[in-house]
Image (spheres, grey):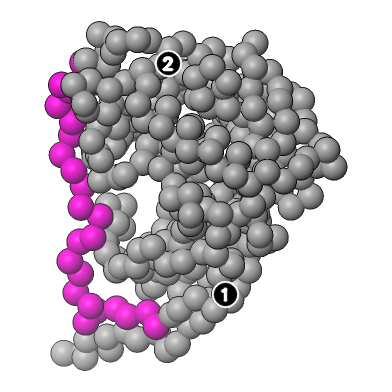
Amino acid sequence: MPVIILLASFSVSAESTDSPPSAPSEVSQTSPAINLLQEYQQAFHQRNYELSFITVRQGHIEPERLIHGVVDGVEVAHRVYLNGPANEGVYRQGVVAFFEPGQTPYSLASTRLPGMFGNLAAIDIDGLTTNYDLVIAGKSRVAGRPAQVMRIVPKSSDLYGLYFWIDYATQLPLRLDIVDHDGELVEQQMAVNLAEFEQPTAWMHELASLDLPKAVVGKLPVDESKQKINWRLGWQPEGMKVAQKERHSLLLLAEPVDYLKLSDGLFDISVYANAIGKTNPLREQLVRQGATSLHTVVRQGVEITVVGEIPPDTASKIADFVKLGPYLELPSEPAQ
């Protein structure tokens, strides 16, 4: 059975707003940029606030709300999509609980709140500056609030870059643009309202005491004598390292799946290798939704799927350069 990757869908259309500041006027100021990012990380984790924002992908818009607080030393956060069926996530002390339509609620261990705001708040800055240049790019206004703009420029042309607007008063996020190598906008998150609180609100206190669903263990035991896929990556973007590699059974599949995650701390790429066996494979496809690309290829009885916030050409290159050895199956049972 094929690996099933779900990309979020959006139904409300909207036009992108103003474009990022132009590159020629920028002056590289690495130290001030690092200081600004450090201030953002501290504010993101230590302040009590409510951020309402929109995510824009390919002309479609999705409103979301992020509530964050620190209750008796415990960091809590609640992120919810405001349109359509309830889709929520709760973060507390290294655990993220997911409440999604049609799914049993579950929790996963995580050191960061899902989403690019959370990635930037948790990333190791030394590691970031190894793969990206940080540049102060001027001043602007978002949601009526003065903001300082930072560029995060990849040293590899195979990855996206970022423009990041940080509120002057609170050092909290106001806007984030993901752009391609040519500076074209591919996805945007932009605040429509930001409110800060001196003390945690009643809802923050409730989040701190909420019973979270049972944690899911992603790696499940499999019988490796039944199937084996001899494969490895033949190419990966510069700066990306293997952060996770395992063979496990997914909830939606009866067959084991090889899984590998690449990460540079800012962007993650998932690579799945699935033996087709007797099931019908997905047709080969390349799908892009905003910054997220998915590419599936089928070779030598193996379905390879690459998905992540990367340019389509990068997803295709990773999938196309996967090296495959012999695919081994148990021989059929002899006739009686």
Q: Which mark is residue 50?
A: 2
Which secondary structure lies at badge 2?
Answer: strand
From this viewpoint, is residue 305 visible? Answer: no
Furthest toward the right, the residue is 24
Q: Residue at x 51, y 64 (%)?
A: 240
User: Would you name the residue on which mark 1 appears?
Assistant: 235
**In what quadrant of the picture does the N terminus appear?**
bottom left
Is residue 207 inside the magenta stretch?
A: yes
From this viewpoint, is residue 176 visible? Answer: yes
What distance separates the C-alpha of mark 2 from that of mark 1? 41 Å
Image coords of residue 117 (percent x, y):
49, 35
Please rate how many residues cluster around mark 2, counting C-alpha atoms within 10 Å: few if below 14, some from 14 to 19, many from 20: some
Q: Magenta residues, as a range?
A: 206-230
Q: Residue at x 25, y 8 (%)?
A: 202
Identify the amino acid type marked 1. Answer: Trp
Q: Viewed as shown, does residue 89 lie left or right of 188?
A: left
Image coords of residue 76 (percent x, y):
28, 26
Quick one: label 2 or label 1, which is nearer the N terminus? 2
The correct choice, above or below, for 286 with respect to 76 in the image is below
The correct choice, above or below, for 59 with respect to 115 in the image is above
